[in-house]
Amino acid sequence: MPPQKQDLDRLHSMITESFSTTVLEFGCGYSTFVISDALRINRERFDKLDPKPEVRNSQLFRCYSVDTDRDWLKEIRNKLDDDNMNLWHSPCDVGLFNGQMCHYYTKLPDIVPDFIYLDGPDPAQVDGSINGLSFKCPERTPMSADVLLMEPILIPGTTVLIDGRTNNFRFLRKNLKRLWAIYSENDMSWIRLEEDKLGKINVVGRDLWQAENNSKHV
């Protein structure tokens, strides 16, 4: 598909405006290059902070992009010149969440992202079936449950941007348990974990934004 400039612009601005440091992308493509540039900008902003806040994060300004298609990952890797972008192959299997049909990637990177971009997988690449139902049926919408699996370990301030996939967004909205702010505009939806910080070492994007603002006024 050709690039959707408005969607890519939104993705870029949301990562920079939230001062995100670790991105998890489901489904790589043009968005992978946009994320790379947004994280580069955030890294340069962070390097200018004086003093720098101590961030408890071993994956600063890195992205993990998960996809089911090895050949597509190789094509992206050949065009992407950024050592901080990690392209990650994983199959995707049909599963259940509280008795509801959905799908999960079977091998996720062991990270704690503060920004998640949900634009994969292609439902046709989901393996398996339940009671004869599969995602190979062309009319069936994608139904990723990876965010629900990860929800308990996400940190306050985490943003999840869902590209299209309205049915999937509604599924997530109904099953999430923590305090999320919900936004929707046309075919794009996003949620933000609006809980209080976990403590002093839980430095999140809004803390970096405040540190940047303070640095400019010194």
Image (cartoon, rainbow, N blue to C red):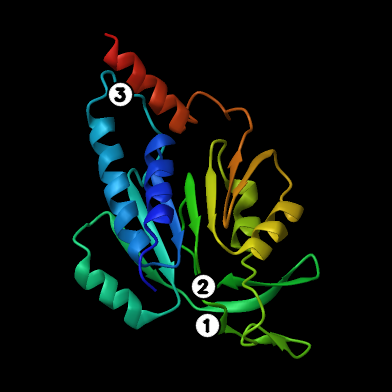
Q: Position of residue 15 (x, y in %)?
A: 40, 43
* Residue at image location 55% in from the left, 40% down from the top: 155
- Badge 2 crowding class, 10 Å Cα cut-off, few under 14, some 14 to 19, many 20 or more, is many
Task: Check disc 1 and give the amino acid type.
Answer: Gln
Instruction: Name the quarter where the C terminus is drawn.
Output: top left
Taking the image as shown, residue 114 lies to the left or right of residue 190, namely left
Q: Which of marks 3 and 1 is nearer the N terminus?
A: 3
Look at mark 3 in the image and give the residue it sits on: 52
Please tell me which residue is depicted at 60% across the width and 70% down the height of the picture: 104
Disc 1 crowd, CA 10 A, few/some/many (<14, 14-19, 20+): some
CA distance separating discs 1 and 2: 7 Å
The residue beneath circle 1 is: 125
Q: Distance between the residues labelled 2 and 3?
A: 37 Å
Instruction: Give whichever of 110, 204 is nearer the camera.
Output: 204
| Callout 2: SS | loop
Residue 118 on image: x %, y %: 52, 60
Cα distance in 3D space between marks 3 and 1:
43 Å
Tell me where residue 9 appears, x and y as whole percent. Answer: 37, 49
Q: Earlier in the sequence, mark 2 or mark 3?
A: 3
Quadrant that contains the N terminus? bottom left
